[in-house]
Image (cartoon, rainbow, N blue to C red):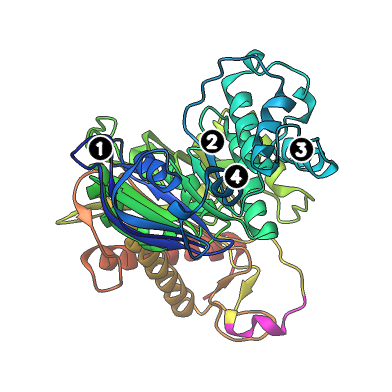
Amino acid sequence: MLHVNNLTGGYGKEPIVKNISFQVAKGEVVGILGPNGSGKSTLLKLISGILPKQDGTVEVDGQSAESYSQKQFARKVAVLPQLHAHAFSHTVKDTVALGRYPHQSGLFSTWSDEDERAVTEAMEYTGVLRYKDTAIELLSGGEQQRVFVAQALSQEAPILLLDEPTNHLDIAHQQQLLDTIRDHALKKETTILSVFHDINLASLYCDRLLLMDKGEISTIGTPLDVVKDTTIGPVYHARVKTQPHPELPKPQMMLLPQQLNNVDSMRVTKEQFTVSKEFVAFQSRQPLKTLSSAVHNPGMGWYRTFVNRHVDQNYNIADAKQENANYLERHGFHLTETVGMMTAVMTEHVEIGEYEADFGSILIAVTAGVGNAVDASKAIERERENRIGTINTWVIMNGQLTEEAFIQAMITATEAKTKALQNENIKDPLTGTIATGTSTDSLLVAATQTGEMLSYAGPVSPLGKLIGHGVYDCTIRALKAYKKAKGWTE
């Protein structure tokens, strides 16, 4: 639909855009990215004919752009520039209606039902229909931007060129507008080429991305191909980290400040634990990077307080998450800074260990109750509902862990826990086989993210060895304490 070949040009003799070649298919959304001054807007102006090109070709629908008259080209290509000047006062509807100019013929063209439909539909699409009789200069910058997007949509051209369409819009209106544009591409097979300032928005809404650097194409491909640390960082001269979007197979970029909040190297110790009949708590002066299967704030995040709360073994609450949050709040724990777990084990029986190695130290805390012990390999045979147990394990490290090491640490800790259950001959009461855990176990791995870099935590790595030893040791001691409290004989 749109074919650009060796396009070169700019504002003077020295070209800003040099030898740009790419294609955009029918119904495809392609985003143009690049730092300030990289030539993004200039490229769009060369394609639309606002600026004269010095070399290369632009083909629209298989035909040279230069072969179209101005009105014919406008029927093929609608343009939303970055800046708008309005010398005359128009209502919103009149402003949007200007997009129908390419479809008018003669000096005294009449306004058709088709024109009315296109304008109304465009205003509805962009959420400005309620302002249709309002003078455009009375609207906010974001509202004006939506009006001009509506003007471009009302043109109903098969190709849409947009220069930062979300400029001046808040996040809700950014989402609404880009949802609309994406829907427009899908339902009407409109070809869309758009400049984006926001890399994450471009990644979410575009099929492909074209990354520019100093007037040339640095790379072009899918968002997964383009939004990478090694691709974005060098072009923008910034420290970045990409990660998956939580709901879509699209990458999102995080900016990494050069000075990471001036965090001093810190060390966590056993003295930061508080143990009572109600809970075990660990509190750090600074947040730790944390991965957990907790009830409150599970997953990955940064938290400075960990709470393992005692509940009755018959605890049965419809909304355990909310009830636990209420409990934490009542006891003065800040909800956004706290990871919360629950256990039927007496929390004063927690086993806490501090283990040293050449690279640093780790803390292990384990509460272990095995009244609902389960052999995971036989769990498919079980019908009984879960009951509160539990073996809750915390592994807290002084050091910097990679994401890989966090996952490996969870695996190593789980393997060590399972070995402790085997050696203590803990059995699944329903199957009579050696248990691998309980039905409600939780695990937390946290790191200060200061000090030595710890890239791996597999069982034979230096960190993994310490985790395996510490978790096994604390779990054995916690199981023995549980057996003693229950009056079990060896």
Q: Could you say which disc has been placed on residue 124 in the image?
A: 3
Type of the residue with mark 2: Thr
Measured Cα–Cα span from mark 3 to mark 2:
17 Å
Q: Which residues are magenta?
A: 377-383
Give the mark nearest the N terminus, 1 or 2. 2
Magenta span main SS: helix
Q: Where is residue 178 drawn, in percent x and y? A: 60, 44
Count of labels in the image: 4
The reply, left or right, for residue 422 in relation to residue 225 is: right
Q: Where is residue 395 drawn, in percent x and y? A: 39, 55
Please tell me whether mark 3 or mark 2 is closer to you in this view.
3
Decide if residue 291 is in sight here: no
Give the mark nearest the N terminus, 4 or 2. 2
Residue occupied by mark 2? 166
Q: Could you say which disc has been placed on residue 266 in the image?
A: 1
Q: Does the segment drawn in magenta span residue 378?
A: yes
Q: In this rendering, is residue 96 above or below 87? A: below
Which class describes the residues within 10 Å of circle 3: few (<14), some (14-19), or many (20+)?
few
Give the mark nearest the N terminus, 3 or 2. 3
Q: In this rendering, is residue 260 above or below 180? A: above
Question: Which residue is at the far left?
Answer: 358
Mark 4 and mark 2 in contact? Answer it, CB < 8 Å.
yes
Q: Residue at x 70, y 82 (%)?
A: 430
Please tell me whether mark 4 or mark 1 is closer to you in this view.
4
Q: Secondary structure at mark 3?
A: helix
Residue occupied by mark 4? 178
Q: Secondary structure at mark 4?
A: helix
- Nearest the viewer among 97 and 433 is 97
Give the mark nearest the N terminus, 4 or 1. 4
